[in-house]
Image: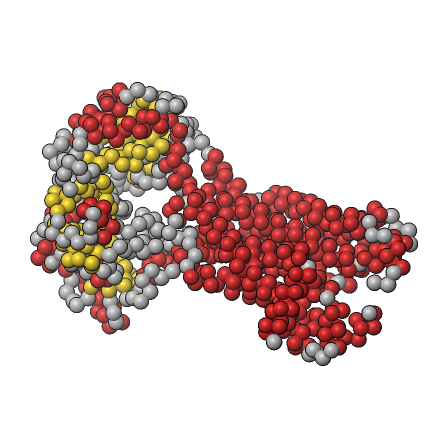
Amino acid sequence: MFELKPTINALMRSKLGAVLLILQLAITLAIVSNAVSIIQDRLTYLNKDTGYPEAEIFKFNALNFDKNLDLLQQVELDEQSLRDLNGVIDATAVSSVVLSGSGSSGGMQLKPEPQESKRVNMGYVTGDEHLLNTLGVKVSEGRDFTEADVVVIDESDARPSVIIVSRALSDELFGQGKGLGETLYWGADPLTIIGIVDTMANQWPKSSFGTKTAMIPMIRVGNFQKFLVRTEPQARAQVMRQIEELMLASHRERVISDVTGLDQKKARYDAKDVLMMRMLMTLIVVLVVVTALGVFGLSTFNISKRTKQIGTRRALGARKSAIVRYFVVENALICSVGLVLGGAAAVLLGQKLMNWYSVPALSYHFIATTAGLLLLMSLLSVLMPALRAANISPSIATRSV
Amino acid sequence: MFVHYIDLAWRSLRQTPLVTFLMILAIAIGIGVTMTTLSVYHMMSMDPISHKSERLFAVQLQTMDDGETWRTPDDIPYQLTYTDAINLDALPGDYLRAPMLRSGFSVHLNTASSKPFIENTRVTGRDFFTMFDLTFLHGNVWTEEQERDAAPVVVIDEEMAKQLFGKTDVVGESVFLGERRHEVVGVTQKWRPTIKFYDLNNGSFGKAERMFAPFSHVKAYDVDTWGNTNGWKFEETRDFNDKMNSEMLWVQFWVQLDTPQQRQVYGDMLMAYMQQQQKPGRFNRETLQYSLQDVNAWMNYNDVISEDNKILVGLSFMFLAVCVANILGLLLAKFMRRAPDVGVRRALGASKRQVFYQHLVEVGVLGLLGGSLGVLFAQLGLLGVRQTYNYYAGLANMDWMMLLSAPVLAISACILAGLYPAWLVCRTTPATHLKVQ
């Protein structure tokens, strides 16, 4: 029905064109399926919930340079004036900003240093009892910090005694669903888990420990102070514009910098991945276009070369549909060989990429889907020249050249 | 003859505008994609200080106890402790050396009209400027006495001088770092290496600092680092003094060693130093270890070229291969269709070699056109990169070398694609085609 044998025979007579198409399709499949896999991996990460209402939160820095300033008093003054601002839900001074890619990390363990015990890496943020509310997260188990939990680090030996952690951190340390009320050790200091938050990313959401976060009720003031503010959804831009003036009005000898939304912070942290995604998408699009043009160009050429033969076939009684079918079948044959080879190449490339770089394993359904789409594209690009071939008049066979 | 071939090529290309257009488009897209990723790669891998990169060394000491590991291939930490930096700086010998760290200050002129701004500052030794090729426009580096006494002095660059004072010759003027008055002793020419190779701790492509202060300020004014501080064991640090005496790692150290002998001597000195430090209980290890890596080795060690970029370069060369296969197919089609013409040319006395040559010239013209269009595509691509990722702004550019290599790459790719079709067409036997006609 498909006249496979004559098609194959004809192909074997002019191998090079077919080989070139096979090569193109194989490389295209290898590149596209791997690129799609990488894109998918980045997209999963980018769409992952961080737990924070990022569009309602912003941060800023204050760098004080007045040696005589009572830093603690100033911080409290600043927090109060921020909270009093119209449109602000809550505000707090923090040690570092989540999702920003910079801050403090360390290990939490089951036994105090220097004893050996299970140790889990995490990122931590310190602040006062407004910390969770400012970040817009709620404990799903246990309770939030109270004013009595908060410790100011100064000359005295006071240390915090409680901690709130993300579910990922407590699960890792104490097992699934456990952890509330347990004690973990931060260096030599014991901390009791009073609350667990289901989803709460740390400063490095992309890293292997990106979901393991700890909130510690502790204030350590310095000349360089970071603040977080959460506002009503619509009020953020307007509040952000007032910040510098407001802060300088209360104390002049300092610099206010980096007034940035948490979503923008995350966007900056993720810019590299977005770039990679865009580059890969561009690559895929142009690659598919170039391959389609290749299929189109080559079939056009083949058809013009065989004008006479087609005319002869038509004159001998072949239907138009038979001519179209011939070219489509021919193309499908070439395409299948290319895609089988390409599938193998894709697997190989995927393995190499995984060995050399931190790229996820290539799952086979990406290859299958890509191969299917490439076959469709290839058939579509052969269709137009084939239809034109079908319109070749039988009379052409009787003319010389 | 060459001009004649070019003329022939031009006619031939115009004869089949669609195929020509497709081929030029294919090569242009291929070159555009490849040059975009390659330009970024080229900028990332470029030697930032080529005339002396093999004489500048980043110093690393294995300070950690036996059994401790670090995230470097050889387990040696990137940075030094403050104690070691100070001690290495004091080692004898006639070579350039610079301990350094990045800090920052609020800078202002202490007048009502000057608004303070935050400025990253490199806190370092006097040799830094000679080692890394900074040029002084006015004044000079602080003196040895000023370094020793931690005198309140700074060196700023011309851009910052203009920003603060509206002119560059500002030696002797005062700037305030926080509440402290500092005297400007030197103004350097603008210095912005694309790769911040001397301090890769907080991203490789950050902006170089515009202000420099003596390293002795660290102790004198409690100048803490704004870069990374890494610990590897539990230490109670209550204040900055504790930090300076701790085993925490937060200082970078570079030396310039001009000869292999100097390197040998310096290495021996480092070993002796570590042995001597073992007496008070530091360097608690079986085998002592140090590392001296020159600029290029150091950039490699710090993975300056991003993984994503390496993947992209690989994929875009594969993409270029697809384009070449594509063009090969089209050229084959085009040349074979012209076989009758070639038959006539051959019959009129053109040698096989001449026909071959003529077709290669045609392919070369194709490559040149495609390459030029490809450069435009690459510029668009690089614009896209800069827009998406501002941090790469300094990297996503084509220098003259890349601009030149685009057409070269395009022509080579086209000639590679054209070799076989040209060979096939030059073998045409005149007789067969003449007969039919």
Front position in the image: B46 or B372: B372
Nearest to the observer: residue B205 or residue B365: B365
Residue under the image location 33 percent in, 21 percent down = A87
Q: Is residue A171 left or right of residue B112?
A: right
Asked if residue A32 can be seen in this view, the reply is yes
In percent of width and height, residue B19 lies at 67, 57
Q: Quadrant of the C terminus of chain A?
A: bottom right
Q: Depth check: A330 or B134 in front?
A: B134
In the depicted view, which residue is nearer to us: A152 or A253? A253
Q: Quadrant of residue B364?
A: bottom right
Residue B122 seen in the figure: no
Residue B136: image x %, image y %? 20, 59
Tally of numbered discs = 0
Q: Position of residue B392 (x, y in %)?
A: 39, 49
Residue B396 lies, in percent from the top left, at 42, 52
From this view, report whether residue B48 is shown above or below residue B219.
Answer: below
Q: Residue at x 39, y 30 (%)?
A: A54
* In the image: residue A275, left or right of residue A85: right
Residue A179: name its quadrant. Answer: top left
Horizontally, is A255 left or right of A132 in the view?
left
Rendering quarter of residue A125: top left
Q: Position of B427 compared to A270: left or right?
A: right
Colour mapping used in the image: secondary structure
Residue occupying image coordinates x 65% and y 69%: B8
